[in-house]
Image (cartoon, helix red, strand yellow):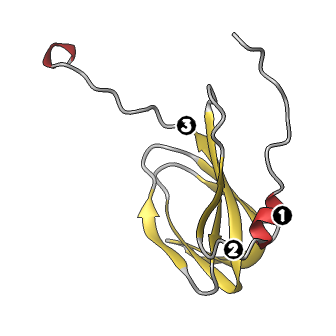
């Protein structure tokens, strides 16, 4: 078994500024054997992630570039480059990019893979 190595995986600032990818995921953690998932996502100006609840996972969100707002049942909260947001599992939220768009990194525990089971395994 190979020993784990520490290394730089990406330049998030450069990826956030890459206009070749207009929206969606710009980077995803894909290291084998990892316990975490992480994604760099870009929302163009005014675009939004609709209101949703993540029932199982706590998520940390870091705004890497741009700004916008995080909607919660308590009201809208502004977020901008450098904002660190805690999204506990079960919380309701939405996200809207500001006039310049917004790129953000999410980090959370890795979801277990789908498992195919026989009837006798249930």
Of badges 1 and 2, nearer the viewer stands 2
Q: What numbered label is drawn on residue 110?
A: 3
**Label 2 Cα crowd, 10 Å radius (few <14 / some 14-19 / many 20+):** few
Q: Is residue 36 left or right of residue 18?
A: left
Q: What numbered label is drawn on residue 105?
A: none
Residue 101 x/y as whole percent: 69, 81
Q: Earlier along the polypeptide chain: callout 2 or callout 3?
A: 2
Q: Residue at x 69, y 74 (%)?
A: 20
Q: Which residue in the structure is indicated by mark 2?
A: 20
Give whichever of 59, 28 is nearer the camera. Answer: 28
**Label 3 Cα crowd, 10 Å radius (few <14 / some 14-19 / many 20+):** few
Residue 29 x/y as whole percent: 66, 44
Q: Is residue 92 left or right of residue 15?
A: left
Residue 119 sits in quarter: top left
User: Disc 1, disc 2: CB below 8 Å?
Assistant: no
The residue most toward the bottom is 99
Q: CA distance from mark 1 to mark 3?
A: 24 Å
The residue most toward the top is 1
Q: Earlier along the polypeptide chain: callout 1 or callout 2?
A: 1
Q: Which residue in the structure is indicated by mark 1?
A: 13
> Could one spot residue 80 in this view of the protein?
no
Q: Is residue 60 left or right of residue 64?
A: left
> Could one spot residue 17 in this view of the protein?
yes
């Amino acid at each position: 078994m190979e020993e784990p190595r520490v290394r730089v995986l990406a330049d998030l600032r450069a990826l956030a500024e890459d206009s070749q990818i207009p929206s969606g995921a710009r980077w995803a953690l894909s290291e084998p054997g990892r316990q975490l998932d992480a994604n760099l996502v870009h929302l163009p100006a005014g675009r939004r992630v609709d209101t949703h609840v993540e029932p199982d996972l706590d998520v940390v969100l870091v705004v890497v570039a741009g700004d916008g707002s995080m909607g919660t049942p308590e009201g809208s909260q502004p977020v901008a480059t450098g904002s660190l947001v805690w999204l506990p599992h079960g919380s309701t939220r939405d996200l809207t990019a500001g006039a310049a768009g917004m790129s953000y990194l999410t980090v959370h525990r890795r979801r277990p893979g789908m498992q195919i089971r026989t009837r006798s395994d249930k």
